[in-house]
Image (cartoon, rainbow, N blue to C red):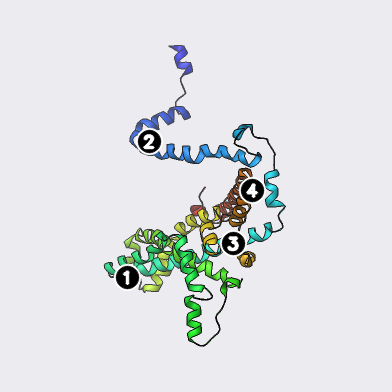
Amino acid sequence: MSLNKKMSPPKGSPGNSLAREFRKNRSLFVLIGPGVLFTFIFSYIPLLGLYFAFTRFNFRDGLWNSPFVGMKNFDFLFKSSILLTITENTILYNIAFIIFGNLTAILAAVFLSEIASRSFKKITQSVMFLPYFVSFVLISAFVYNLFNYEYGTLNNILKGLGKEPVDLYSEVGIWKYILVSFHVWKQLGYCSVIYMAAILGIDEGIYEAAEIDGAHVFQKVWYVVLPQIVSTFFVILMFNIGSILKGQFDLFWQVIGNNSLLYKATDIIDTYVYRTLTTTFDMGMATAAGLYQSVFGLILVSVVNYILRKKSPENALF
């Protein structure tokens, strides 16, 4: 008996508290079990594949027996003359996506929340949400038929007005605005739903207090709605920053494709890596590029979260 007492964990120890917490909330642990298992299998076990980035992989030897090459798989990125350009393009495009995407989504959510007609609100939300389900293949076809030099809608309008057609597929600068516009248009419905949910969660008592104080619609939006959805904005911002070095490959590849005339303004890391790997088929180089993007994103999230924790602790993720 004395030995058992000595071996048992002391009262208040982590093991004892964990067992007590499990007994107290057994049903909750059972509910989160499938989610934890799914995350472990599909998010943590695949991390072993990062070893691809440091090997010259071949199917005969397999992952663990392939020759170890250290950092050589990163050479095609870091020794590339256009690394700075594609990294700059990737970051700037994602910054534009974050700024304009969240701004338009917040405006749409605020306007929809002020609409009194529930049927009109539902129809509007459905119409806004439809582009989210449209594939980038269809969007590329839409863009091509809109801007094609010979048969495009834009040039047909210009010809009808007696003006010269414009070959936009050789104009570098304009595609920055086209790509950002189509991305914002496609994501608007999805992002606005998130902000709508945050707005619907605002306590009605705050609105009533603002009305008693004589606040009009714009004042309620500015002093009530926007401060209440700040935390939602920061959560979305942190997730977006984590993938800021991962471009929208589907959008860029489907719309721009192999048009080398537009590479200077539209080439991002994902498209550059894809073009390289379709000629080399090197899994190590592909993993190295993905690891470079992920580590850069982790550093950015950590830095931004550190700044938020100093300036606004309640909005920090960790």
At mark 3, the secondary structure is: loop
**CA separation, marks 1 and 3?**
45 Å
**CA separation, marks 4 and 1?**
55 Å
Three-letter code, disc 2: Phe
Mark closest to the chain's N terminus, 4 or 2:
2
Residue 135 visible here: yes
Rendering coords of residue 30 (x, y %): 36, 35
At mark 4, the secondary structure is: helix
Rendering coords of residue 297 (x, y %): 58, 51
Mark closest to the chain's N terminus, 1 or 3:
1
**CA separation, marks 2 and 3?**
50 Å
In the rendered structure, are the residues bearing label 1 and label 3 in contact, judged by CB atoms less than 8 Å apart? no
Residue 268 higher or lower than 174, as above or below: above
**CA separation, marks 4 and 3?**
17 Å
Question: Which residue sits furthest bottom?
Answer: 162
Residue 255 higher or lower than 63, as above or below: below
Residue 139 higher or lower than 157, as above or below: above
Give the label on residue 115, or none: 1
Three-letter code, disc 4: Thr
The residue indicated by pointer 2 is 29
Give the label on residue 2, or none: none
Mark closest to the chain's N terminus, 4 or 1:
1
Residue 228 visible here: no
Mark closest to the chain's N terminus, 4 or 3:
3
**CA separation, marks 4 and 2?**
47 Å
The residue indicated by pointer 4 is 280
